[in-house]
Image (cartoon, rainbow, N blue to C red):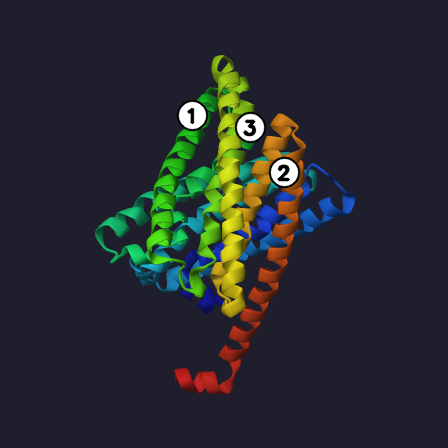
Amino acid sequence: MSTAILAAGPGWFTSVMGTGILAITLTVAPVQLPIVRHLGAVLFAIDVAMFVGFTLLWTIGIARSPRTVTESLHDPARAQTWGAPPMACFTVAVGFLRIASGAIDAAASVEIAQALFVAGVVLSLWSAFLVPYLMFTRHELTPQRAYGSWLLPVVPPIVASVPAALLSPTWPESMRGSMLGLAYALLGLGVALAAIIIVIFYTRLLYHKIPEAAVVPTMWIVVGPLGQSVAGIIALGTVSASVWPELGHGLYVAGVAFGLLVWGFGVYWLLMALAVTVRAARKHLPFSLGWWAFTFPVGTLTSGSYGLYAATHAAVFDVVGLLLLGLLATTWSIVAVRSLRSIAVTMRFAKSPSSRLATA
């Protein structure tokens, strides 16, 4: 198990992101049923256990073999997955604020969320700078090899926006303006970088067509920054009035306007990704860790739809949000079952006498 996690690099944290976003969207859905909230709480407990377990296994593995970090960063494909740990930190932080605060001490939930947020910000800036730097200076890249996974290391600053908004009232009053300014700056950084990469990826699709089946799931990653930027900018606008009274209303209105425009593109791209995935599945769509891209991006667009519904009370965002929640629950169930099956096969192979002889 630990060997498989190390071999995949930080990519296993995408499962924490996908499970966490499902738990959160179930909990904050506009239409609430008691059983749904309980299911969200159970999923979040599982998510925390996964986060802690992967972090421990990953840390122990790196301590035993520090060169693993360098090897993964110098691999053009594995380097992209370094964006997953900070996004996992932000997702779990939101879960502690939205879900766990009702089950454990509220002050403890806030402190844990604050620690995860700070760790996530540090890691997100690290991945957003270092991975593109290595792409500029070391990785051998071609236009044909431009995939949606290039977004992974630069999206975390966008994901920081929602926990930043939720944590805003918890910081000392003297810090709130600085923390809110940092959150807007991170959002702008991530949106600008994501926009550049989306254009590059769109161009690659035009000239080099749909990539091979194994990387089709990376098309779904484009939905992530679109949906998350909608949810994040509305959340930041909502709290800005209490921090910057003169600017708050304008920031909120601008955020809703941005969200209305970007949400349409997010829905469009999700439909395109669905069409491409169905086309690939008819031929052959092999399972890989990349299948977790079917979950978190859908969750961010679901959250964005919730945010627009709260701001506009337009029924279309409520209806689409619930449809997206259904899609998220379906894809998560499929990917979770396939992942458990893959882990079971890997562990069984590792324990078999033939595999031990083969590696002796």
Secondary structure under tag 2 reads helix
Mark 3 crowdedness (10 Å alpha carbons): few <14, some 14-19, many ≥20: some
What residue is disc 3 on? Answer: 170
Q: Can residue 171 be seen at all in this image of the molecule?
A: no
Nearest to N terminus: mark 3 or mark 2: 2
For residue 43, above or below residue 244: below
Say which amino acid is labelled 2.
Arg
Question: For the view shown, which residue lies furthest in the left direction?
Answer: 137
In the image, 92: left or right of 6? Answer: right
Q: CA distance from mark 1 to mark 3?
A: 15 Å
Depth check: 198 or 164 in front? Answer: 198
Real-space Cα separation, disc 2 to disc 1, in angstroms: 23 Å
| Residue in the picture at 54% in, 43% down | 267
Q: Name the disc covering residue 98, or none.
A: 2
Q: Which mark is residue 181?
A: 1
Q: Residue 135: horizontal and vertical position, in percent?
A: 27, 51
Q: Secondary structure at mark 3?
A: helix
Mark 1 or 3: the one toward you: 1
Residue 337 position, x and y percent, is: 61, 64
Quadrant holding the C terminus: bottom left
Instruction: Identify the secondary structure beneath mark 1.
Output: helix
Would you identify the image quadrant in which residue 238 lies? top right
